[in-house]
Image (spheres, rainbow, N blue to C red):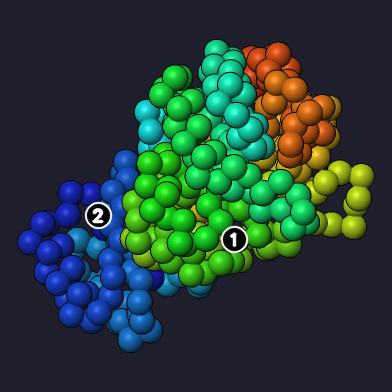
């Protein structure tokens, strides 16, 4: 249920309403927008009399929300959320580029790439320390050593770091990571999501291989229900009958989610394509669709990368792509697409 308040509501009446809802064991999520304040009521609201609330002088409207996700629902939070990540932010109309190798391989490698992608305009460094792989015989990442090398690269460049967590037991190791990534395979690892909800680090939640929009948003809800509202969604392609690409990139997810949720939306064209030459071809579509940013795999020697070399672009290619994406974003900001009513 959502309660839309009139402008400049009487503080005493608002406090009285909040106390009454607390007595009913209803959690209240308050969202202060540019023109209205909205109270999102979470809990057993079936017994709440909407007419009783509507009769209050400070209330403009009361609506019941049918969707099972509440905190993630745009109805609860009409304005887009802006998530702070280290010394930068994601959302709110800006374009964020995250870039770096699939896996951290050495200090020399990660520092060199970090410097190159920063010079090209990336504001967040990506890199895998722990790697979930389909085969148990494939490279699984450098683990703790990889995390330390990412921190070295952050120290050298000032770029915040994003890297993937595999299990809730690893949370102490991620205490100094700026943005914690939950991979597609862990999107419905509910124990992990609950634990991430009880800490304050922002979370990049990738879409599961076959997840629906509602399932994806419900996973975000697990994190937000625990108290952590710093969630970012990442579309990285879904599994379909097509085998030419690694996955099928769902560009339509961006406008759909923009309507359903206030959470920022990131696109990962590298994992969707699986082919380096496709990344510069598909990345502009994400910007055109309105994504808040992209996460792109960049490697200085893709042919000898220990993981996902075929989908990694070289630093010089990223430099050209980043310039194109920022120019496209600026153009679209001044020439918005028409909206059908």
Q: Residue furthest left?
A: 12
Indicate the position of residue 153 as horizontal and vertical percent values: 48, 25
Disc sitting over residue 187 in the figure: 1
Res 335 seen here: no
Indicate which disc, 1 or 2, sits on the residue closer to the N terminus. Answer: 2
Residue at x 75% of width, y 22% of height: 301
Residue denoted by label 2: 6
Of residues 323 and 285, the one drawn nearer to the viewer in this rendering: 323
Indicate the position of residue 77 as horizontal and vertical percent values: 39, 53
Q: Relative to 218, is 48 above or below? A: below
Q: Is residue 284 left or right of residue 100?
A: right
Q: Is residue 6 left or right of residue 140?
A: left
Q: Quadrant of residue 169?
A: bottom left
User: Dots 1 and 2: beta carbons under 8 Å?
Assistant: no
Residue at x 57% of width, y 34% of height: 126
Q: SS at mark 1?
A: loop
Question: Could you tell me how many numbered marks the image carries?
Answer: 2
Q: Quadrant of residue 2?
A: bottom left
Q: Quadrant of residue 154?
A: top left
Of residues 269 and 312, the one drawn nearer to the viewer in this rendering: 312
Tell me the crowding category of disc 2: few under 14, some 14 to 19, or many 20 or more residues within 10 angstroms, Cα based: some
């Amino acid at each position: 249920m959502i309660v839309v308040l009139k402008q400049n509501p009487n503080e005493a009446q608002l406090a009285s309403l909040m106390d009454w809802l607390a007595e009913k064991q209803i959690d209240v999520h308050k969202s202060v927008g540019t023109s209205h304040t909205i109270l999102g009521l979470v809990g057993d609201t079936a017994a709440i009399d909407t007419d009783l609330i509507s009769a209050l002088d400070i209330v403009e409207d009361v609506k019941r929300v049918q969707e099972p996700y509440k905190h993630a629902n745009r109805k609860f939070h009409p304005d887009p959320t802006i998530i702070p990540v280290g010394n930068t932010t994601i959302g709110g109309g800006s374009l964020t580029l995250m870039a770096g190798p699939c896996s951290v391989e050495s200090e020399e490698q990660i520092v060199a790439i970090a410097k190159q992608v920063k010079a090209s305009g990336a504001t967040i460094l990506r890199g895998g320390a722990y790697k979930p792989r389909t085969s148990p015989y494939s490279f699984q990442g450098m683990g703790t050593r990889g995390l330390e090398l990412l921190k070295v690269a952050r120290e050298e460049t000032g770029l915040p770091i994003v890297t993937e967590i595999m299990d809730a037991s690893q949370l102490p190791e991620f205490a100094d990571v700026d943005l914690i990534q939950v991979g597609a395979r862990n999107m419905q690892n509910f124990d992990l999501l609950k634990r991430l909800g009880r800490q304050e680090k922002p979370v990049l939640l990738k879409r599961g291989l076959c997840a629906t929009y509602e399932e994806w948003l419900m996973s975000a809800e697990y994190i937000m229900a625990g108290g952590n509202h710093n969630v970012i969604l990442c579309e990285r392609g879904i599994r379909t009958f097509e085998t030419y690409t690694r996955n099928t990139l769902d560009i339509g997810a961006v406008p759909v989610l923009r309507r359903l949720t206030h959470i920022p939306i990131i696109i990962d064209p590298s994992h969707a394509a699986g082919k380096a030459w496709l990344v510069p071809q598909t990345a502009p579509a994400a910007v055109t669709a309105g994504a808040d940013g992209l996460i792109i795999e960049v490697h200085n020697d893709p042919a000898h990368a220990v993981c996902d070399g075929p989908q990694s672009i070289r630093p010089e290619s990223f430099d050209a792509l980043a310039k194109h994406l920022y120019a496209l974003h600026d153009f679209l900001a001044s020439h918005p697409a028409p909206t059908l009513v």
